[in-house]
Image: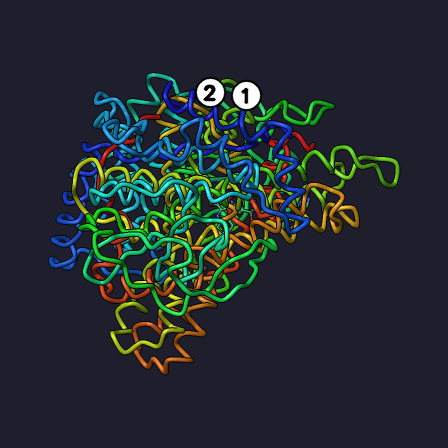
Amino acid sequence: MSEMRQLLMDTAVRLFEAASMDEVFKAVEEGRRPLSHWRALEENGLVDLLLPEEAGGAAVGFGDAMAVARAAGAFALPLPLVETMIGRWLLSGAGLGAPAGPLGVVTAAGRLEVAWPDEISALVVSDAADRVGWVAAGEFEFEHGTNGAGEPVGRLREPPPIPPGQSGGLDSERSPSTLMAVARAAMIAGAMERVLDLTIEHVQGRVQFGRPLARFQAVQQLVAVMASHTAVVGVAADTAIAAVETVLDRHVGDATFMAGCAKARASEACYEVTRIAHQLHGAIGYTREHDLHRFTRRLWAWRDADGDEGYWRQSVGEMAIRSGGAGLWPLLVETPGAALER
Amino acid sequence: MKAPTVHLRFLPAALPEAAENLRSEVRVLLEETRAEGVWLADGLSWWGRNPALSRALGDAGFIGMTWPRQYGGSERSYLERYVVTEELLAACAPTAFHWFADRQIGPSILRYGTEEQKQRFLPPIARGELSFAVGMSEPDSGSDLASIRTRAERTDGGWRLNGSKIWTSYAHEAEYCVALVRTEPKSDKRHAGMSQVIVDLKNSDGITVRPIIDLPGRHDFNEVFFEDTFVPDDCLLGDSGDGWAQVTSELAYERSGPERFLTNFHLLRALVDALDGSASPGAQREVGRLVSRLWALRAASVSVAAALEAGETPNVESALVKDLGTNFQQDVPEIVRRVVADEGVADEVVLDILHQVILAAPSYTIQGGATEILRGIVARGLRLR
Ligand SMILES: Cc1cc2nc3c(=O)[nH]c(=O)nc-3n(C[C@H](O)[C@H](O)[C@H](O)COP(=O)(O)OP(=O)(O)OC[C@H]3O[C@@H](n4cnc5c(N)ncnc54)[C@H](O)[C@@H]3O)c2cc1C
């Protein structure tokens, strides 16, 4: 891991570990506003990681920023950090200043659903004419709903029109759907790592029939399966992130296929990972007293967010069928290039 | 709450430029040899055996690629070998003639063999002229390989073999077999007293090869009986008593390779060929489901290959890739079968491959470490056992 990434991770993890995070969860559970904790993220520069230095950002690479997304997943961060980070960067890339406060990002892949609709200060929207812009809170209509984690979401009927002067050209390398898909895959990877860790801890500590659950072969086999899915989702997310980074750095190619594969695989694995985690936790995992639900419920929400497995499978499948039999293999192995530092 | 412990981390890796450049070389060679009629795709892909193709690949330097030049290799990196391997699989090339020697036996000889053995066996393997079989399993020893009973007893100038090996793929065709045998009686130490010997299958007395017809109806594997079969001293591979350590040291290479998820790529490819722009959204999603899983598996497999190249021993990660990869392969024909039925695909090519692959599919999760054994290795890696 690069020094920069380590430093970022340490900062992010320190923030997420702070005792106040438990308060944020409590607030969410009780239907209160969690955004009083938003300031800490802003003050530490996390929302501006991707922005160039001229725009007051940290100008970190996409991969480094995604390491923070993964950490946010590992803490089930119930705040729209990733949306805001990417939203501000999209606007900055279009030569626009971003409104202060948390943002939502609307994408077609995400079925026009936006997290925390009453809390965000603006929506970042792109249109078919390859423009991106923002629409302030109160200036778009939506229906209230909740996601799989019980968090509020707003459902838009159509992308709201962007008011004049609030949009700019969208660089084709920064497709909001693609960027949000890989970011969400990274968050899923982080949350799965947490769920696996909780499960391993549990089966090692819980004693039945005179021995820890971990001593039973049937239990070992189930943990191995969830560990395998977790590991593959992690490397798939990282590989797609590396592809996005290459596209951004070298201005070549397109990472939609890789992003779609990573998100489809991440969303697909949520079922098996959460199923096994709950099975092995027994009744205590079926409560809001144990921490497990924080993470499994976010996995159920995030597998649907920014394109569920159905959406991305179809996108990937279309590309595969269009490529034809002879083109299928090249599609699978041709990356935008560039070896990632090990 | 603290940050979670990450129990298994696969670092993302990309193949280096040198490896990528090989791709087109392999593709050209395969195209040319196919056009010349050297080979035809086999319904079971790399399980097909074609000595002429293996010779052509040997001539082009695609066998024993990572070995030193003095033994016929081309001193390429493991990642370059990886690209060649996956290209062969993607093209459905029949490579069983050299597969086992290239993948595990050659590397074992290179690592444990005497100078004389290296000079004698490695160059012809690399030329694609010498074929080896793997003699590990026995009728009473499958997953529990350490329980083997075939014994080798000291005799004048060598060893005398008695016992039998089973499921020995291509023992009826290969020139040699590397057999794991007991050179000392069983003791309390489960993994002690075993050795590897190189058996000349064509020129030794006391060998009987009994064909076994497999589920797809083919004669690919056999039972091999040894009755006082003489193995000269210079065919002991490595040190007597070190057999277990020797066979397990190559497992990461054997398990994480692309043959664990690309064995029936030709089926997916044929399906994609049979579908077109009019495919239903449901069919598109099923294709995308398979393709996204395959892409993710390959990302994991390339990560393991890079770790191997870096000199690590990713045994747990390899077991994991093999488990998920072979499960994926097993799902492929089931999913293709549904799409074919739902879309009314009548393409004979797809149906023909599909029927063969359904018959081959049960073997994926048995050979080279069965599912439960692999998961046990992963569980041990997680310190659960
Ligand atoms: C197509 C094919 C080609 C082969 N080619 C070769 C070859 O060339 N050379 C060679 O030496 N061998 C070869 N084999 C043999 C292969 O290595 C063995 O089949 C494999 O090691 C499994 O052994 P087994 O078949 O005896 O199954 P068993 O070991 O009897 O296993 C049967 C089932 O029981 C499970 N099981 C076993 N032990 C445990 C345990 N402790 N806990 C939980 N579950 C357990 C297994 O996971 C499996 O699901 C080949 C096999 C096939 C199918």
Above or below, A271 against A51 in this view is below
Q: Are marks 1 and 2 in contact (CB under 8 Å)?
A: yes
| Image side of residue B176 versus residue B197, left or right | left
Residue found at x 45% / y 30%? B250
Q: Quick one: label 1, few (<14), some, or many (20+) residues within 10 Å?
A: some
Q: Which mark is residue A243?
A: none
Q: Are marks 1 and 2 on the same chain?
A: yes
| Image side of residue B327 versus residue B342, left or right | right
Residue found at x 44% / y 66%? B333
Residue found at x 53% / y 33%? B8
Amino acid type at circle 2 is Gly
Residue tagged by mark 1?
B242
Q: Chain of mark 1?
A: B
Q: Which mark is residue B238?
A: 2
Quadrant position of residue B92: bottom left
Q: How is the image coloured?
A: rainbow
Secondary structure at badge 1 equals: loop
| Image side of residue B89 versus residue A28, left or right | left
Residue B220 percent coordinates (x, y): 43, 55
| Picture quarter with the N terminus of chain B | top right
